[in-house]
Amino acid sequence: MMLFGAGGDALLARGVKQTAAIDIHHIVHVFTVLANPYIVLGIFSLLIFMWSYMTALSFADLSYVMPATASSYVFMTLLSIFWLHEHVGAERWSGILFIVIGVGLVAGEPHRTGDAPEPEIRVEPAEERR
Amino acid sequence: MRTLYTWLCIVITVCAATTGDVLLALAMRRIGDLGELRRRRGFLPMLLRVLSSGVLFAGVFFMAIAFFSNLVGLSWADLSLMGPASAALTYITNALAAKFFLKEDVNRRRWLATMFVFCGVLILTHT
């Protein structure tokens, strides 16, 4: 989730900046950006992120999963320091610190609460007999 | 006028993303633990179970609206406005929606975690 969520967003941002601004009167032109390879790669990354997100939501609360997904921002910053050798200022470090504290707080919580409806997994009669 | 359109995009993105997340969480909660389902039934039946959920597709539909609205907004406004506004606000609206629609126990600790993450994302996406 961390890898493909952050990567997908970065690819989309780069792809959109390479295309022309979309006119409100020609909103259908939003689909033309799909021809950009960065947008296509971004969508592919986000599809993998989506499957991981769905798997997490199948056993944990939304209010537990959502803050935890923010750790992708930490991953992106570490990537920009160690891979791209970018300088990260004090302001960005304070942002990272806020996210780490937030993720740390939610990590100590039980991952499922509330009146969860029974999963719609039916036991087949053949399985019951076994 | 462009500022008005940008903020309209931000509102649409946040509302659609929150609706999508809530519907997706509801669908996955009904389907059950995917890991357990795969172990008990195998990969293909698990995949068919996921793909037969109407609520899940409704969630994906709203997420697609959020995605395209974000794309349109990004083409008009700078990332330093669209990023913090849409990404950070979604954490707050999701926590509210999880409490009132999904009946999750969003206690003080989870609220605190959400607020820390909101501030962190706001700072990171604005710098």
Image (cartoon, coloured by chain):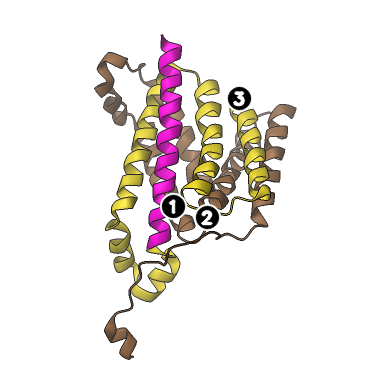
Chain colours: A brown, B yellow
Q: Is label 3 in a helix, a strand or a loop?
A: helix
Q: Do the residues labelled 1 and 2 touch (CB within 8 Å)?
A: yes
Q: Does the rendering let one see residue A60?
A: yes
Looking at the picture, which amino acid does disc 3 mark?
His
> What's the magenta region?
B1-30
Q: Is label 2 in a helix, a strand or a loop?
A: loop
Picture coordinates of residue A124 (x, y %)?
A: 29, 80
Q: Do labels 2 and 3 share a chain?
A: no
Looking at the picture, which amino acid does disc 1 mark?
Ala
Q: In this figure, which residue is indicated by the disc labeled 2?
A: A61
Q: Is residue B121 magenta?
A: no
Toward the viewer: A39 or A124? A124
| Chain label for disc 1 | B
- In the rendered image, the residue lying farthest to the bottom is A130
Q: In this figure, which residue is indicated by the disc labeled 3?
A: B126
B12, above or below B92, in the image:
above
Residue at horizontal 57 percent and vertical 52 percent from the top: A64
Question: Quick one: label 3, few (<14), some, or many (20+) residues within 10 Å?
Answer: some
Q: In which quarter of the image is residue B2?
A: top left
Toward the viewer: B94 or A56? B94
Return the disc, 3 or 1, that comes first in the chain's sequence. Answer: 1
